[in-house]
Image (spheres, rainbow, N blue to C red):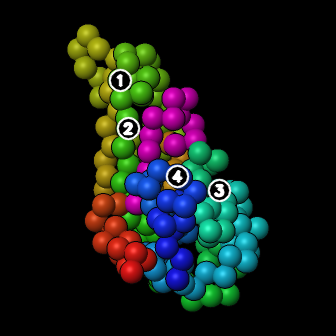
Amino acid sequence: MVDLSRRNFMRAKKVSSPPAIRLPWTADEALFTRGCTQCGDCISACEENIIIKGDGGFPEINFSAGECSFCQACVKSCKEPLFNSLDTLPWQLDIEIQSSCLAKKQIHCQICQDSCEPEAIVFKYLHGSVPQPEITLEDCTSCGACVAVCPESAINLSVSRQSTSYLGANNE
């Protein structure tokens, strides 16, 4: 099994880099890195071109290139048994709007709200202030549509802290 944190150490990369966002419907990092053949079929199949070769050649999601449409092309193209049931949530991702957000700097911008199809991002009007973004986590699908359009790259999607317990499995 590949220990990606050790690989990063040998490359003098920041050892505490956040875990990669893997393909939708894959929850177990150890199973994914053990079973993925790095063939690139999922990268070729991705209609949105958001799957890239990451550390060790393993595919990962790059939301700065666009959003996931949950088309399942990556799942259908993969010959390995890496995926959970398609009836489950595709990801457990945390979303954060950082302080570099234009609205938080008192500059009118609502492009993330405009790109959010499930309307999980709304702007609350405050007296004497620029409207501020709020995320309704129950409505957020973690598609990443808001990430690529943000002019300040202030929106971050990352592997949920709740789902990182499996990440310890690849440090054995």
Give the side of residue 154 with respect to residue 75, left or right: left
Does 153 sit above or below residue 56?
above
Is disc 2 surrounded by few (<14), some (14 to 19) or many (20+) residues within 10 Å? some
Q: Nearer the viewer, residue 108 or 14?
A: 14
In magenta, the rendered stretch is 147-159
The residue at 35%/60% (across/down) is: 160
> N-terminal of the two: label 3 or label 4?
4
Q: Residue furthest left?
A: 127
Is disc 3 surrounded by few (<14), some (14 to 19) or many (20+) residues within 10 Å? some
Mark 4 against mark 1, which lies toward the viewer?
4
Q: How far apart are labels 4 and 2 at the CA level?
A: 25 Å
> N-terminal of the two: label 4 or label 1?
4
Q: Nearer the viewer, residue 137 or 83?
A: 83
Find disc 4 in the rendering and name its residue: 13
Q: How far apart are labels 3 and 1 at the CA level?
A: 28 Å
Q: Is residue 83 visible?
A: no
> N-terminal of the two: label 1 or label 2?
2
Q: Position of residue 11 (x, y in %)?
A: 58, 57
The residue at 54%/47% (across/down) is: 145
In the rendering, which numbered label is found on residue 170?
none
Numbered disc 1: secondary structure: helix
> N-terminal of the two: label 4 or label 2?
4
